Image (cartoon, rainbow, N blue to C red):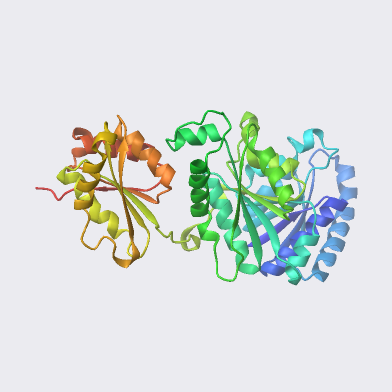
């Protein structure tokens, strides 16, 4: 994984190059130092500048080599963001490092080179504000302190996996930062809204903590400090709250995922605003930079939700739900009733009768639940969010069952709207 560092020879760019060299040394990867001359220069000016820039690149490369980085340099010509993206692809770069926009930049860099890089690069972009923390990490005098911006998106998973890779090279303290809007979360999890708009109940906070704990579980590694969590309710732009939280935690690096939105889509982009506004260094990881193939971690299933309407077809899914958790974990066996309160005791008893005789073997925990609701699928989707289960398991009738039976229509709707894996169990044909 080559590291590419873009420079324009300012003090800020020198700090970025120093950080890039420290990372290249720590990761034992080659470093490419690059400067781009714009096409708009006249031929005479361009020719005069080329020798000067080549000399400056050579001097800077020698400085970085003294820091322990295997450094090469390249002078390019063209539109900076386009040329850097092209060169990064050509060299198989796994990380691009640059200095952040200065306070003198119009609108803190909106539309500038860093902004354009963030929307075009297929690999993570690191904007460096200071290099001392990376130097200390490389020397082993202190851990690198990182905040990971947590949300429920694929770019978040890409950012998490990038950070997981970084933790292999040294001690990295991770703080998982989650900014949420309470009103939205109550609705998503099917919880009753409190009287006051921004009030956070213990039940909501507990559910969100469980969700975040599950999301960052792949980061937990032997020999590394445990991941801490910071959950903050907010109103307005999430990036502002996340940057403030990172500053409060005094982290060296803020890591966020990116959808690489453009134009007006940037208005709600956390990565776009974090790259501009954060006082600390920031890494923006695009979905294109997600782990692939052998680098993908095998997930550990900890919980399964299995639903039944007590039909034979639905009940067939129950033993399959238990089979997904061979050691430990929790199985939630649920049914949905319109008048759950009056029938709760009877229905819980019927659910327990459906449990396999070895249901609690190998450390499994079993919880039976009677849920109330008129529409089954929305109730199941919300309780799956609230319990933060890893898999939803449902039974249905044959190949035509997805359209013609009650549980079949439920399975179809759940598969259409769930943001987690769904296992549908069909009976054998005939």
Q: Is residue 425 left or right of residue 18?
A: left
Image location of residue 344, percent across then percent down: 26, 40
State which quadrant residue 188 falls in.
top left
Whether residue 79 is visible to the viewer of this picture, yes or no, is no
Q: Give the residue at x 56% y 28%.
A: 196
- Against 221, residue 267 (above or below) is above
Q: Is residue 399 left or right of residue 385?
A: left
- Against 15, residue 188 (above or below) is above
Q: Is residue 138 left or right of residue 378?
A: right
Nearer-the-camera pick, 42 or 177: 177
Image location of residue 71, percent across then percent down: 76, 66
Quadrant location, the N terminus: bottom right
State which quadrant residue 366 falls in.
bottom left
Nearer-the-camera pick, 239 or 7: 239
Image location of residue 210, percent across then percent down: 49, 50
- Against 336, residue 332 (above or below) is below
């Amino acid at each position: 994984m080559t590291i590419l560092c873009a420079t324009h020879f300012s003090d800020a760019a020198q700090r970025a190059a120093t950080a890039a060299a420290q990372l290249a040394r720590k990761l034992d990867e080659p470093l490419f130092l690059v400067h781009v001359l714009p096409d708009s220069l006249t031929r005479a000016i361009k020719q005069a500048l080329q020798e000067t820039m080549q000399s400056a690149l050579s001097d800077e490369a020698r400085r970085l080599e003294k820091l322990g980085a295997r450094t090469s340099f390249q002078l390019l010509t063209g539109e900076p963001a386009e040329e850097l993206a092209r060169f990064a692809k050509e060299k198989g770069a796994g990380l691009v490092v640059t200095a952040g926009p200065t306070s003198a930049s119009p609108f803190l860099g909106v539309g500038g080179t860093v902004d354009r890089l963030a929307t075009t690069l297929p690999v993570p972009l690191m904007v460096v504000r200071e290099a001392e923390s990376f130097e200390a990490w490389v020397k082993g005098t202190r851990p690198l302190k990182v905040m990971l911006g947590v949300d429920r998106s694929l770019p978040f998973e890409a950012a998490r996996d990038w950070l997981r890779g970084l933790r292999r090279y040294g001690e990295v303290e991770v703080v998982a930062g989650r900014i949420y809007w309470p009103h939205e979360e109550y609705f998503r999890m099917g919880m009753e809204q409190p009287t006051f708009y921004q009030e956070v109940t213990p039940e909501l906070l507990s559910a969100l903590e469980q969700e975040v704990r599950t999301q960052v579980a792949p980061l937990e590694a032997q020999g590394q400090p445990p991941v801490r969590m910071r959950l903050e309710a907010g109103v307005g732009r999430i990036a502002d709250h996340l940057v403030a939280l990172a500053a409060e935690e005094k982290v060296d690096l803020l890591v966020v995922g990116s959808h690489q939105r453009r134009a007006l889509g940037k208005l709600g982009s956390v990565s776009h605003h974090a790259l501009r506004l954060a006082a600390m260094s920031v890494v923006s990881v695009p979905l294109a930079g997600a782990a692939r193939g052998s680098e993908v971690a095998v997930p550990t299933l900890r919980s399964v939700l299995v639903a039944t309407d007590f039909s034979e077809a639905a009940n067939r899914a129950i033993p399959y739900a238990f089979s997904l958790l061979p050691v430990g974990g929790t199985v939630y066996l649920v049914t949905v009733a319109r008048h759950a309160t009056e029938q709760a005791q009877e229905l819980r008893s019927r659910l327990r009768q459906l449990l396999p005789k070895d249901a609690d073997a190998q450390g499994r925990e079993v919880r039976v639940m009677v849920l109330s609701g008129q529409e089954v699928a929305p109730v199941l989707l919300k309780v799956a969010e609230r319990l933060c289960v890893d898999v939803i398991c449902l039974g249905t009738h044959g190949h035509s069952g997805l359209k013609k039976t009650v549980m079949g229509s439920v399975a179809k709707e759940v598969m259409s709207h769930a943001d987690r894996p769904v296992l549908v169990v069909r009976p054998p044909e005939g």
